[in-house]
Image (cartoon, helix red, strand yellow):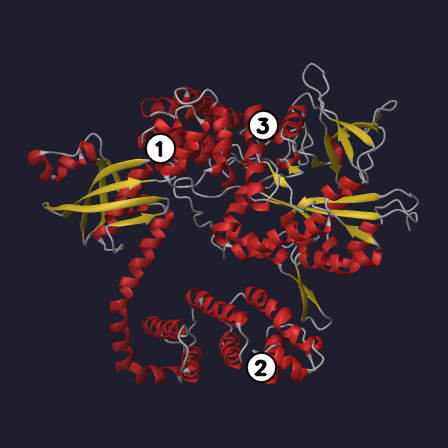
Amino acid sequence: MTGNNSKKYLVVHGHFYQPPRENPWLDIIEKQDSAAPFNDWNERIYDQCYRPNAYSRLLDGNGMIADIHNNYQNMSFNFGPTLFSWLERYHSRTVQRILDADKHSRIKFNGHGNAIAQVYNHIIMPLASKRDQLTQIRWAKYVYRRRFGSDPEGMWLGETAINMETVLCLVEENIKFVVLSPNQAEKYRRIGEGGWTFTSQQGIDTRIPYRIFPRDRNGVQHEKYLDVFFFDEGLSKEISFNDLLTDSRIFGNRINSCYDHHNDANQIVTIATDGETFGHHKPFGDMCLAYFFKAIAPELGITPVNFGYYLSVNPPTHEVTLKNDSGEGTAWSCAHGVGRWTRDCGCKTGGEDSWHQAWRKPLRESFEYLQHEIDQQYESRMSDITNKPWDLRDKYISVMGKASVSKMRTFLKNNCTIGDELDDQRVLEIRTLLEAQKFMLFAFTSCGWFFSDISGIETIQNMAYACRALQLGICKDKQKETLERFLEHLEKAPSNVNNANGRTLFERHILPFFHHERILAFTAAIQQILAVKKSSTYSNFAYTLKARSLKTLKGARAVYDVALIDLENPTTGEKSAWSVLVSHQHETELRGWVTPAEKKLSGSLASKPDAWMTHEDALSFSLSDLFYSSRRELNKFLQKNMSSDTDKRFNDWFKQNEKHINLLSKLGIDLPEYAAAPLEYVYQQKWNKLILGLQKRGSEDEVFGELLQIYTMMNRYSLALDFEETAGELQEIIIKELIDLSEKLTVQKCERLKYLLNIVDRFSIPVIKNKLEDLFFPILRDAVSNFCNDCNIQNASEKHGSISNGTLELVVKFARRMNFSTTSYSS
């Protein structure tokens, strides 16, 4: 036990972060095969970590769910701003749980919230210019205010990388504290007293906060200061890399061992680790954390708090200086300063033991060259509207991603001297330049240097952002020259595989999309020819398209369609018009030639396909050149079209041969492939239609019987049902029913849900039941609990008129079916 008047405080900080993954031309995350069975790594980690921590299960002795706990209520956390934007876009319920957790903590801790900010897209701050560091902080502050309703007290630094310039930027922006590794501390002492103790001689005590008194390059001390929490490195590493999260009692005892039990002063143990540790890296780690917060911490007398609250009641008594703070600084994941992001320092993750990282320095130099060129053009092209272009960039976050030209004009009017006098074209040009600044900063996201080879998806993603920045930020007449010099720099960055280098990787994976507008125009022409889109005007990814068929030309061996495609990107302000010639016939693939609309052919040449193909401004494309997402959409459309004809043919075949097929199945010999394939198709289509038909209520028993018959026949013929399409559809049907049930409890609704779950269980359909449990728990916790807690059942029935005894009994049975413990609900 510590002294009678002391308290054992604890902060568990989760750094929840993924790099921005969106295709910079389409504004969507395209499928990442390495994240299978999910579409991409964001989705995979969301399912394993971000959602589970908002709905963490507490189980009883029988493995039933006794409670669902929101871990974000008890832990300190930061979410990368770009990751949180993705969560807001696709997973609003989980976002609300995170926001609610922060609100709860502010009430509990006198206005101090669990959420802290993070530098915007996780750059290595000491390697960036001061203005880039300030932009990262200011953008982060803006999105934090919008989400959490106040300025952030603390800020998470990418890889905790820091030097004195970073400290000065943070205090300039009124950030109160950061979290660092104890290995980043150089020396410490009581504030203003005596000599310093170097950490090389005696390690720093991480159970108290410290204060940095920053100084400028002339050694003059700043009037403000920055407070620092150093996390317990041994404990944090055990959580991240060992098995400490397998048992919450062992976890709690290990934390308890970190306090000085002979010290009468208040103490804080600080844990800091990637938030993804709790569930993604360590499966069920979120459940260990939840049970610790709920049961073990109170038992051990440990009080979980957040950093802001602890500082308010226990301000620092010691000051600290950081290693190499006048140089490149330090980080938590590199033993060589910040070498991991600028040179072959020896730190790496993945790859072969023999692999080098000599590519890191030339990669950074490539991006720094490109940034210099883009920044020069930005300043030059903005000089007629403002003498503070970098202040304008800082404020751009307030309209970033908003499509309206009028909103952009209002923004410029409020922040530029002549903003209200600009025409639409100039407004859109300015937005394009600001988007280039955003993408150039994205190119410096730390993950691009973290791993072992330049060919990794994170580095390729950074290259894509650099390419997009070049497109948007360099004027057309200088793009070719700038691109070539950029590629010359990249050529000096050697890969460890396939004799590749930065240039060859860029040319293979990124450069084709330099012509993204032509690719999208060719895609739109194909979509019109094949009638993929019902309308001639529609949205496709980040673009609005208008497609017009002009004429059909007939050649000696092929038919040619000519289309005019107008493209507009409301976010970047890009506009263009393209003439597209598409060659197609049954024996060959579709191929297209795309030219700027203003370069269209005239006179007799306009009717000669060869003249289109050989035009000096034409570029040729095939279906393999489409964006991957477009190819997937086209694949789905073609298969659906084929299936309408296939349905009839295979069903006719099935009716004609049903007797023979039945006889074959009874011989105990597998069906031949030519018979199994059409039979599997017929049953699969029938199954899919029945599941989709469940959206409408009625005839439940009849549908169940038909599903059972199909399932039985498939098993008889040793064929497998594919649940990929129908599992998601059935899950959405059940989710809608649960939402309906939450509005009003009735017997009929419970019976309907029971029926749908019977289908899931009987046929082992891979529905994600966690999501269903998340929705059902508030019903059980609120409506049913309120009913059960009333001692007089009859009075309760009158008070809660929507619930009868029969309904309650059915809901309790349904709860057990959903794996919830119902002991407390039994009468």
Q: Nearer the viewer, mark 3 or mark 1?
A: 1
Q: Earlier in the sequence, mark 2 or mark 3?
A: 3
Question: Label 2 belongs to which residue?
Answer: 807
Question: Label 3 belongs to which residue?
Answer: 342
User: How far is the residue under mark 2 from the one under mark 1?
Assistant: 59 Å
Query: Label 1's element?
Result: helix
Label 1 near label 3: C-beta < 8 Å?
Answer: no
What percent of the width, then of the height, locates residue 269?
Answer: 79, 45
Mark 1 crowd level (few <14, some 14–19, many ≥20, 10 Å Cα): many
User: Residue, x 61% and y 39% (percent of image)?
Assistant: 118
User: Residue, x 51% and y 24% (percent of image)?
Assistant: 365
Name the kind of residue labelled 1 in the image: Leu
Name the kind of residue labelled 2 in the image: Thr
Residue 602: mark? none
Residue 183 in which image quadrant = top right
Q: Is residue 191 left or right of residue 824?
A: right
User: Residue, x 65% and y 76% (percent of image)?
Assistant: 787
Tell me, yes or no, if residue 333 can be seen here: yes
Query: Label 3's element?
Result: loop
Q: Earlier in the sequence, mark 2 or mark 1?
A: 1
Q: Is residue 421 left or right of residue 270?
A: left
Residue 802 in which image quadrant = bottom right
Name the kind of residue labelled 3 in the image: Thr
